[in-house]
Image (tube, rainbow, N blue to C red):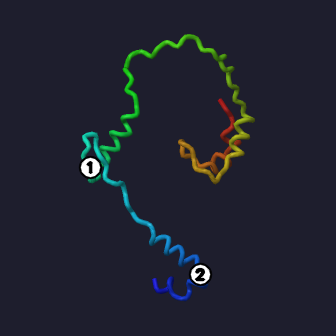
Amino acid sequence: MEEIVSESHTKNPKRFWAYIKIKGQEMMGVAPLKNSDGFLRSDKESKASVLNHQFSSVFTRESDGQLPDKGPSPYPTMPNITVCERGVQKLLQNLNCHKVSGPDELPHQILHTAAEELLPIR
């Protein structure tokens, strides 16, 4: 602390103000909460239960019966999608290698590099 507050704060004020900013923060956590009976709860488990009850109360419970028939759709049906090798190759070669992998967890670099080998669709 002596290093930060000494006369070097004039030479490197960024370090000094970073220290002040860190010291000004407090770890408060979640304040005590009232449950549905009006009692104040402060332990972790009770607060989690109160929040869970509050959040789940906004959702509607649907019956498990049949869905209602909405009749015919007012929208036209979508035409079939055609996938061609050239389009797939273009998409694979334009992948941004610096982005996070998708749900398949394949790195984009591998897909980008092996685009031509992966291309033949059978």
Q: Residue at x 36, y 54 (%)?
A: 30
Residue 107 in percent (x, y) is at: 59, 49
Tell me where residue 11 sits by quadrant: bottom right
Mark 2 secondary-structure assignment: loop
Q: Residues within 10 Å of mark 1 (few under 14, many from 20)?
A: few
Check the image and report above or below for 70 versus 10: above
Write down the residue under mark 2: 12
Quarter of the picture holding the C terminus:
top right
Count of numbered circles on the image: 2
From the viewer's perspective, tell me whether residue 30 is left or right of residue 120. Answer: left
Q: Residue at x 62, y 51 (%)?
A: 99
Residue 84 in percent (x, y) is at: 72, 31
Quarter of the picture holding the N terminus:
bottom left
From the viewer's perspective, tell me whether residue 87 is left or right of residue 104. Answer: right
* 67 or 117, nearer to the observer: 67
Write down the residue under mark 1: 40
Mark 1 secondary-structure assignment: strand
Residue 74 in percent (x, y) is at: 63, 15
* 39 or 79, nearer to the observer: 39
Check the image and report above or below for 93 versus 10: above
Residue placed furthest toward the bottom: 7
Q: What amino acid is labelled 2 in the image?
A: Asn
Check the image and report above or below for 66 versus 51: above
